[in-house]
């Protein structure tokens, strides 16, 4: 509750009061930092972040991804973004990739074949 405008610290008008992070937030930050120190975890989360940026960075690429999911008879799933303050965002992002991995790879292949500016990145991510 440290928000500069609406946090508790803003409403407490006492110079002697100190700010202390809540234990849940501190634990979450520690888990995020630990995940970054483990090479396979860091690499996996980095790839997921790149996938999210590439696919959701363009309405056209996102539409290709959605249409491939629809053709496969899947409920349309959007890729989740990562958040450095919440370790659970990494888990949700990984689940979203896992649910539609085949369609994601097909989308990357389509981008690699048709998008001059992002084709190389899509090709690398599809491997």
Image (tube, rainbow, N blue to C red):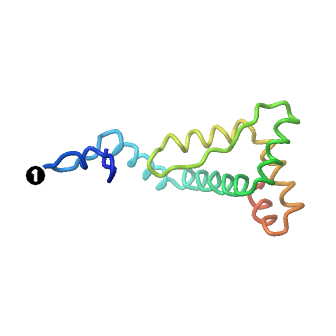
| Foreground residue among 127 and 57 | 57
- Lateral position of residue 55 relative to residue 27, left or right: right
The N terminus appears in which quarter of the rendering?
Answer: top left
Query: Can you identify the residue that label 1 sits on?
Result: 16
| Foreground residue among 20 and 126 | 20
User: Which image quarter: residue 25?
Assistant: top left
Which x, y percent locates residue 127?
77, 55
Q: Residue furthest bottom?
A: 117
- Lateral position of residue 63 relative to residue 42, left or right: right
| Foreground residue among 8 and 82 | 8
Neighbour tally class for label 1: few under 14, some 14-19, many 20 plus, Cα within 10 Å: few
- Residue lying at 81% horizontally and 47% vertically, measured from the top left: 63
User: Which image quarter: residue 50?
Assistant: bottom right
User: Which image quarter: residue 123?
Assistant: bottom right
- Is 109 placed above or below 87 here? below
- Is 32 placed above or below 95 here? below
- Residue lying at 80% horizontally and 31% vertically, measured from the top left: 74
- Lateral position of residue 60 relative to residue 42, left or right: right
Which x, y percent locates residue 120?
79, 66
- Lateral position of residue 4 relative to residue 54, left or right: left
Which x, y percent locates residue 20?
23, 47
Element carrying mark 1: loop
Count of numbered badges drawn on the protein: 1
Which x, y percent locates residue 82?
55, 49
- Residue lying at 86% horizontally and 34% vertically, measured from the top left: 72
| Foreground residue among 112 and 66 | 66
């Amino acid at each position: 509750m440290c928000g500069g405008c609406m946090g508790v610290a803003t409403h407490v008008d006492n110079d002697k009061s100190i700010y202390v992070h809540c234990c849940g937030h501190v634990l979450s930050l520690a888990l995020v930092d630990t995940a970054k120190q483990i090479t396979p975890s860091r690499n996996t989360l980095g790839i997921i972040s790149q996938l999210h940026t590439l696919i959701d960075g363009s309405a056209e690429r996102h539409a290709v991804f959605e249409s491939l999911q629809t053709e496969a008879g899947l409920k349309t799933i959007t890729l989740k973004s990562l958040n450095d303050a919440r370790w659970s965002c990494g888990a949700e992002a990984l689940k979203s990739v896992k649910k539609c991995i085949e369609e994601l790879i097909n989308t990357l292949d389509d981008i690699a074949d048709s998008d001059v500016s992002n084709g190389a990145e899509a090709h690398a991510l599809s491997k």
